[in-house]
Image (spheres, rainbow, N blue to C red):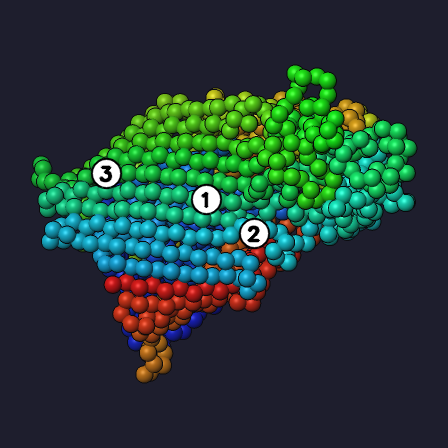
């Protein structure tokens, strides 16, 4: 195992170095990618409140595994956002705003932390130990965008790996990410950075200014930070690995389930042959290839100049795909990455009113703008049953047709020559709307004021905090879509009595249907749509949302009494939180004018929660009370009572212990009960019927041999096909609802939802300067069992559960239906209706470990007379098991897959000498399966190779306060492991350079 080899190599190197060196200076426990040890050393000596506990204690004394990411790594690694930093931590699943390659969108541009791949809604985000308002909307999770966090004020990021709900409340299932901001910044700091790929197609830049000042004899401090950064939209065609346009289809060479031949084969490049951007001509509005209009023995299409030319559909493989040709390239369906522009403005300050009383405040303003390329508008024979997206009928009377085109088509079709219709099947990705981008804009305001202090009473000291915060988040997602009723009017063009081309509704004898604004639209060939027609048919589609949070938090702590091993600490806390959310579709969506014609409605909801907690720390051994093999032993426990106005009452707890065997050797263990409350959207999303794609069909020829139990899936599918012979040949069946919006889906919330609950156990060992001075090694086991999970059931989930279960649950199988007879566009067996909502049915079983190693030494200890110091770091996460069930009836193990690699590791080495610091980093992803249960029988590429990315950077302090930096990310231009897009680095080799000036 490569990870084990790396771990052993680092440990051996550290031990060997120490054996030939005199006594080294002890280094504080820090993660692999951190600032130089000297920067963190002072913090380790303090008694502070750290993430995972509200008791003041030494930062190394918590029983739960906590990893820290220092602020200096931002410059060292060329990171431009807090989201970039989260992607450096191996226990957090990378969030890249990158499309999956299946035609889906690349996302809003927001980045949310996700520990252990358990879902972004199960990782709680804090700022300075306090909750933050949700920055997203939709039928999903409460989550906070990392882009709004000011990098110029980050002191460190602390990550509690597993649990935390007893201390912080809902959502801390997988753990907690806490952004700790600087509270005593002095001076003025300017920072600029620019970077790009070697191909020059992914420019990134950032700039920030941070200013701070102490005042009133250092009793107060105020700091202001302004920063901006930008990363671009990326398309699949921008990079070689993403431009393959790869799909898989049934393999005719496959002879059976045990022949060693995959049931699927790769198709590269894959195209939709049924339509393109000029317009493919059909004699009948249906997708079979025999309905293509033939001109001179070849299929026909329009050219950009409006003439009729031959069309190469490629090697047709069925409906809708072909290999090659002049159709629509599969990889062009949507964009690869979302471009993000972010701006944040922050003020943070405090003032000591007296020696025992401090006022503190935080003010945050953030605006993030994400731009992505969604699937564009198309009028295709693949959707002919839909009045909103079916192919366009035209006759020889259409005035936009040239006489040459009329003559050519009349010769090919006598019916057309006699006034009958042909059909135009084309997409309008590039020439119909003012823009083909989807825009996501979010604006966040948050104001916090608080007091903290201490006082003496009843012979003991009490320390306390009280804070109130208000946050307001407003967002909008919008794109241009076609008002399909206006589109249908505009493409039905005629000449009026004056010989002008007009919309037919304005030239007929009926006056009640006149539309003076209607501008005729020329659909024949790309680039022929007038601005007037574009403006007439274009409508803004999307929604606005608003989230509001009020949070009141009070804590008080003291030492209850003193035992022989030390004082017993107690902290009590009370938190009141009110959350409100509104969701408002754009007017076109409320009126059902765009998309599939579904009418969308406004929704809103609110709740409040009152939560009480008590935390205790009891030293059992320590100080002057020790035993052989027991230098220190303590117990910590937390209990939290939650009263949610909607979800009801919940009790959660945690217990932990630390056993210090001797100096430098400590064992630790925790056990906790955690929970997540349903979100407002999960509860109150309105009931809407939309036309959407139906998702993956388990009975498709390329999936029937997959799933947790392929034999059960195949048997259930075969039984249904036997009962419904009109569905056709199961061996070649492909459900068009996977790729096209043909399924009527009922969506909406579930007001009967309850909390989901998890039981979490962690145990581990820490070697800190044990035997080897300067060496720290930590290893922790993490086990999470979640029940009553808040599962977002989709049509595909209902179908998978239905066909993968025995016996088949009637309630699940009735959530979808299939077409019983072909409708002219879609074959019998196509998913006709479906359902999307949330249920308390999910289960998760996670087992894994986190490893950390850090070793620092002076080069002079190895080579007499040499100068400088070296820091070696290693961080790894092992996902031993991740078993999930959306429904609680069928289970899927997704560990050891591309989505959840079993080993993720990062190796760092840094050399610092005076003004110079050089850093090397290697990122590692283990060899994995392409999908759960992938084998050569069901996947042409079941095994994905391990992936290594090497990076190098350097900083040089030219003079006091002025530092230059530069780096190369992915030195060897290593792409993602074939054929994936995300098991590795899609961007390839890239460079950055920056300057930091502080005075």
Q: Is residue 765 visible?
A: yes
Sequence order check, earlier mark of 3 and 1: 1
Cβ–Cβ below 8 Å for labels 2 and 3? no
Mark 2 — residue? 234
Residue depicted at x 29% and y 29% = 576
* Element class at badge 3: strand
Q: Nearer the viewer, mark 2 or mark 3?
A: 2
Looking at the picture, how far across and down is residue 828, in whole percent?
Answer: 78, 28
Q: CA distance from mark 3 to mark 1?
A: 28 Å
Q: Is residue 31 above or below residue 384?
A: below
Residue depicted at x 63% and y 47% = 101
The dot on residue 449 is: 3
In the rendered image, the quadrant that contains the N terminus is: bottom right
Q: Furthest-front residue in view? A: 498
Sequence order check, earlier mark of 2 and 1: 2
Looking at the picture, how far across and down is residue 98, in whole percent?
Answer: 55, 48
The dot on residue 922 is: none
Q: CA distance from mark 2 to mark 1?
A: 15 Å
Q: Residues within 10 Å of mark 3 (few under 14, many from 20)?
A: some
Q: Is residue 30 visible?
A: no
């Amino acid at each position: 195992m490569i990870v084990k080899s790396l771990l052993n190599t680092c440990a051996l190197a550290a031990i060997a170095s120490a054996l030939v060196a005199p006594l080294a200076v002890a280094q504080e426990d820090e993660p692999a990618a951190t600032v130089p040890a000297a920067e963190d050393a002072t913090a380790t000596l303090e008694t502070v409140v750290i993430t995972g506990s509200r008791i003041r204690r030494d930062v190394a004394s918590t029983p739960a595994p906590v990893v820290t990411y220092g602020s200096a790594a931002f410059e060292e690694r060329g990171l431009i956002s807090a989201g970039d930093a989260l992607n450096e931590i191996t226990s957090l699943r990378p969030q890249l705003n990158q499309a999956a390659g299946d035609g889906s969108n690349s996302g809003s541009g927001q980045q949310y932390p996700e520990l252990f791949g358990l879902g972004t809604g199960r990782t709680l985000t804090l700022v300075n130990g306090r909750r933050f308002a949700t920055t997203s909307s939709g039928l999903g999770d409460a989550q906070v965008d990392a882009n709004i966090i000011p990098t110029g004020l980050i002191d460190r990021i602390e990550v509690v790996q597993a649990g935390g709900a007893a201390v912080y409340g809902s959502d801390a299932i997988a753990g907690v990410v806490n952004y700790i901001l600087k509270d005593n910044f002095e001076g003025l700091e300017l920072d600029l950075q620019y970077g790009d790929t070697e191909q020059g197609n992914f420019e990134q830049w950032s700039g920030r200014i941070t200013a701070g000042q102490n005042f009133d004899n250092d009793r107060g401090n105020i700091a202001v930070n302004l920063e901006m950064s930008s990363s671009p939209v990326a398309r699949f065609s921008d990079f070689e690995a993403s431009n393959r346009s790869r799909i898989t289809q049934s393999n005719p060479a496959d002879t059976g389930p045990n022949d060693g031949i995959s049931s699927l084969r790769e198709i590269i490049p894959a195209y939709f042959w049924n339509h393109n951007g000029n317009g493919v001509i059909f004699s009948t509005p249906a997708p079979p290839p025999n309905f293509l209009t033939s001109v001179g023995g070849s299929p026909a299409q329009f050219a950009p100049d409006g003439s009729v030319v031959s069309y190469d559909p490629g090697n047709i493989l069925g409906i809708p795909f072909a290999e090659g040709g002049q159709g629509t390239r599969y990889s062009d369906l949507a964009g690869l990455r979302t471009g993000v522009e972010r701006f944040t403005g922050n003020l943070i300050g405090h003032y000591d009113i007296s020696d025992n009383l401090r006022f503190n405040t935080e003010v945050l303003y953030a605006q993030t703008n994400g731009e992505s390329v969604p699937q564009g508008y198309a009028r295709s024979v693949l959707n002919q049953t839909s009045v909103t997206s079916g192919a366009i009928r035209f006759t020889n009377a259409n005035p936009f047709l040239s006489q040459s085109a009329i003559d050519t088509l009349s010769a090919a079709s006598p019916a057309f020559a006699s006034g009958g219709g042909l059909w135009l099947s084309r997409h309008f990705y590039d020439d119909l709307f003012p823009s083909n981008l989807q825009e996501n804009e979010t604006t966040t305001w948050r104001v916090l004021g608080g007091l903290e202090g201490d006082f003496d009473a009843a012979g003991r000291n009490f320390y306390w905090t009280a804070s109130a915060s208000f946050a307001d988040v407003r967002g909008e997602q919008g794109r241009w879509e076609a008002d399909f009723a206006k589109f249908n009017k505009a493409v039905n063009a005629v000449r009026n009595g004056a010989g002008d081309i007009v919309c037919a509704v304005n030239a007929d004898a009926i006056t009640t249907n006149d539309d003076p604004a209607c501008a005729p639209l020329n659909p024949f060939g790309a680039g022929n749509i007038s601005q007037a027609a574009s403006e007439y048919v274009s409508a803004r589609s999307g929604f606005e949302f608003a989230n509001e949070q009020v949070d009141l938090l009070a804590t008080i702590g003291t030492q209850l009494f003193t035992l022989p091993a030390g004082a017993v600490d107690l902290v009590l806390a009370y938190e009141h939180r009110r959350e409100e959310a509104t969701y408002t579709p754009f007017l076109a969506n409320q009126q059902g004018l765009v998309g599939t014609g579904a009418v969308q409605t406004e929704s809103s909801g609110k709740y409040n929660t009152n939560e009480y907690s008590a935390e205790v720390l009891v030293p059992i051994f320590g100080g002057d009370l020790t035993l052989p093999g027991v230098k220190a032993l303590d117990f910590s426990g937390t209990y939290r009572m939650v009263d949610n106005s909607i979800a009801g009452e919940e009790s959660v707890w945690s217990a932990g212990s630390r056993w210090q065997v001797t100096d430098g050797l400590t064992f630790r263990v925790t056990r906790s009960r955690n929970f997540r409350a349903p979100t407002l959207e999960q509860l109150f999303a309105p009931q809407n019927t939309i036309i959407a794609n139906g998702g993956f069909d388990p009975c498709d020829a390329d999936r029937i041999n997959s799933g947790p139990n392929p034999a059960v899936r195949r048997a259930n599918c075969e039984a249904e096909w036997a009962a419904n012979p009109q569905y056709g040949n199961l061996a070649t069946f492909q459900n068009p609802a996977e790729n096209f919006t043909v399924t009527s889906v009922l969506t909406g919330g579930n007001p009967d939802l309850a909390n989901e609950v998890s039981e979490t156990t962690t145990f581990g060992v820490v070697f800190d300067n044990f035997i080897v001075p300067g060496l720290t090694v930590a290893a922790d086991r993490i086990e999470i069992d979640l029940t009553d999970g808040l599962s977002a059931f989709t049509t595909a989930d209902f179908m998978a559960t239905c066909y993968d279960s025995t016996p088949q649950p009637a309630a699940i199988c009735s959530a979808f239906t299939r077409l019983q007879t072909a409708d002219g566009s879609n074959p019998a067996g196509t998913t006709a209706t479906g359902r999307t909502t949330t249920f308390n049915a999910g289960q998760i079983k996670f087992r894994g470990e986190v490893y950390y190693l850090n070793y620092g030494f002076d080069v002079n200890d190895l080579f007499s007379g040499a100068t400088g110091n070296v820091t070696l770091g290693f961080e790894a996460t092992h996902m031993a098991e991740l078993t999930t069930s959306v429904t609680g009836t069928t289970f899927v193990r997704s560990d050891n897959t591309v989505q959840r690699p079993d080993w993720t590791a990062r190796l760092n080495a840094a050399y610092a000498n005076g003004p110079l610091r050089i850093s090397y980093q290697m990122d590692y992803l283990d060899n994995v399966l392409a999908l759960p249960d992938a084998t050569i029988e069901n996947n042409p590429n079941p095994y994905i190779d391990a992936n290594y990315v090497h990076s190098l950077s350097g900083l040089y302090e030219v003079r006091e306060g002025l530092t230059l930096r530069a780096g190369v990310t992915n030195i060897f231009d290593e792409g993602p492991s074939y054929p994936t897009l995300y098991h590795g680095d899609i961007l390839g080799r890239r460079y950055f350079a920056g300057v930091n000036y502080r005075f």
